[in-house]
Amino acid sequence: MIRSDALAEARTWIGTPYRHQASCKGAGTDCLGLIRGIWRALYGGEPVAIPPYTPDWSEPSRDEVLMRTATALLTRVERPDPGDVLLFRMRDKGVAKHLGVLATSETFIHAYSGHGVVESSLSAPWRRRIVGTFRFPERG
């Protein structure tokens, strides 16, 4: 089952330091890099090339790059299960730009600046920021 494989892989990244634009288990990753690493483990390669990006990417242009890309590559779901991808809007009028993987009904795994890859409580402030829930596609 793809969700259990995605969650198992996400757990192997816990403890990886935070590194902007990186995607190397044990060496460094950001939130997008974590999802990219899970994708590579599930499918063997990445679906698209990722251009360089700054920490404030998409903010000046208000371009919803992550939402658009998640919608194109993943399956949108109404009720996420463990192993599904969560997309967050970190500020009320900002673009969606943080990703994580649902671990349990109460926790999620994400790469967080200053903390690395951690399993965090999916507390009310985090839940309010969720703007999309997605599932990795079944292998075919």
Image: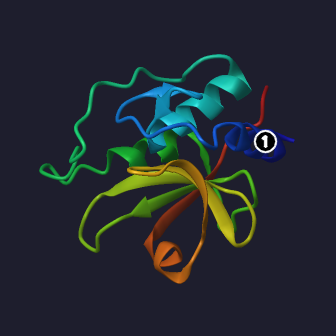
Q: Position of residue 79 (x, y in %)?
A: 69, 68
Looking at this view, name the residue that lies furthest to the top: 44
Quarter where residue 93 is shown: bottom left
Residue at which label 1 appears: 8
Q: Position of residue 111 (x, y in %)?
A: 50, 47
Q: Is residue 59 above or below residue 17?
A: below
Q: Is residue 117 above or below residue 86?
A: above
Which residue is rendered at x = 58% and y = 52% of the image? Answer: 118
Looking at this view, name the residue that lies furthest to the left: 60
Q: Which amino acid type is marked by label 1?
A: Ala
Quadrant (top left, top right, bottom left, bottom right) of the C terminus = top right
Q: Nearer the viewer, residue 28 or 94?
A: 28
Element at badge 1? Answer: helix
Q: Is residue 68 above or below residue 12?
A: below
Q: Position of residue 27 (x, y in %)?
A: 51, 26
Q: Position of residue 125 (x, y in %)?
A: 46, 79
Which residue is rendered at x = 51% and y = 61% of the image? Answer: 132
Looking at this view, name the residue that lies furthest to the right: 1
Label 1 CA crowd tier, 10 Å (few <14, some 14–19, many 20+): some
